[in-house]
Amino acid sequence: MRETQPDLAEAYCLSYVRGLSKAAALGRLGVAERDLRSLPIAEAVEAALCAEGRPPMTVHALSVNGWTVIVEPTGCRVTRPECYRTLSAETELVSVRVLMGHRYEFRWVIDGVLQTFFDARAPQVRRGTRPDALVAQMGAVGLDGRTPATDPGAAVLALADRVTGVRIRSSHLAGPLLGAELDAALPMAQR
């Protein structure tokens, strides 16, 4: 991602939701169907970089192999418990949050219950109801905790690839995606 989406590579949140349509997934985040439109990620990133105050929060969605991937280039709403619980209701969610040099988080949630959570800088420190469920897959992508991951952002994305079977390619993010601008506050139903 660093080569094709350099601004996005610095900070982003990608969340994979099994079996929901793009509109349904965005709806669970509080986006009204009437507010959906085609939004280029590059424009959202540029607007955030140029913002003098709080950057506009946007959310984008694409569908790949039975999963809807939610891209948050200017925020990480899905990492909030009230959001990932709603988004994963009766399904499965995998979320990767990267803030280059600060956070490299991985979340796996099933039907509102956090199964596994960790930061790739300390992958041996895991939380959730099944903190050790992904240990074999973590080791396969260099997140064994014995040696620091050389690229923790790439490692958590590789783990998401293994868990979901979905590999995000630059072509997935190149054009406009279905999305919307988000209000700063969460919808009333999610508070």
Image (cartoon, grey):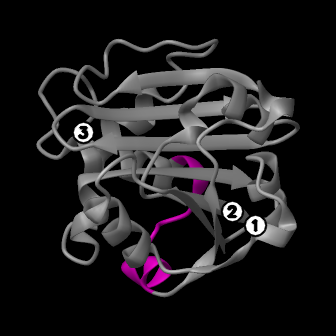
| Cα distance between the residues tagged 1 and 2 | 6 Å
Name the residue carrying label 3. 142
- In front: 29, or 92? 29
Q: Earlier in the sequence, mark 3 or mark 1?
A: 1
Residue at the spot 73% in from the left edge and 47% down from the top edge: 29
- Please say if the residues under marks 3 and 1 sit with CB atoms less than 8 Å apart: no
Q: Is residue 188 left or right of residue 93?
A: right
Dividing the picture into quarters, in which one does residue 46 lie?
bottom left
Dividing the picture into quarters, in which one does residue 96 lie?
top left
User: Residue 95: image x %, image y %?
Assistant: 53, 42
- SS at badge 1: helix
Asked if residue 119 is positioned above or below residue 61 in the image, the reply reads: above
Residues packed near mark 2 inside 10 Å, few (<14), some (14 to 19) or many (20 plus) = many
Amino acid on which the number 3 mark rests in the picture: Gly
Residue at the spot 21% in from the left edge and 32% down from the top edge: 102
Residue at the spot 64% in from the left edge and 48% down from the top edge: 183
Name the residue carrying label 1. 22
User: Residue 64: image x %, image y %?
Assistant: 64, 72
Name the residue carrying label 2. 68
- Please say if the residues under marks 1 and 2 sit with CB atoms less than 8 Å apart: yes
Magenta residue check for 83: no
Residue at the spot 13% in from the left edge and 29% down from the top edge: 148
In the rendering, which numbered label is found on residue 59? none
| Cα distance between the residues tagged 3 and 1 | 31 Å
Magenta residue check for 173: yes
Asked if residue 120 is positioned above or below residue 17 in the image, the reply reads: above
Q: Earlier in the sequence, mark 1 or mark 2?
A: 1
User: Residue 176: image x %, image y %?
Assistant: 54, 84
- Single out the residue that lies furthest toward the front: 52
User: Residue 62: image x %, image y %?
Assistant: 63, 72
Q: Which residues make up the magenta segment?
A: 163-174
Amino acid on which the number 1 mark rests in the picture: Lys
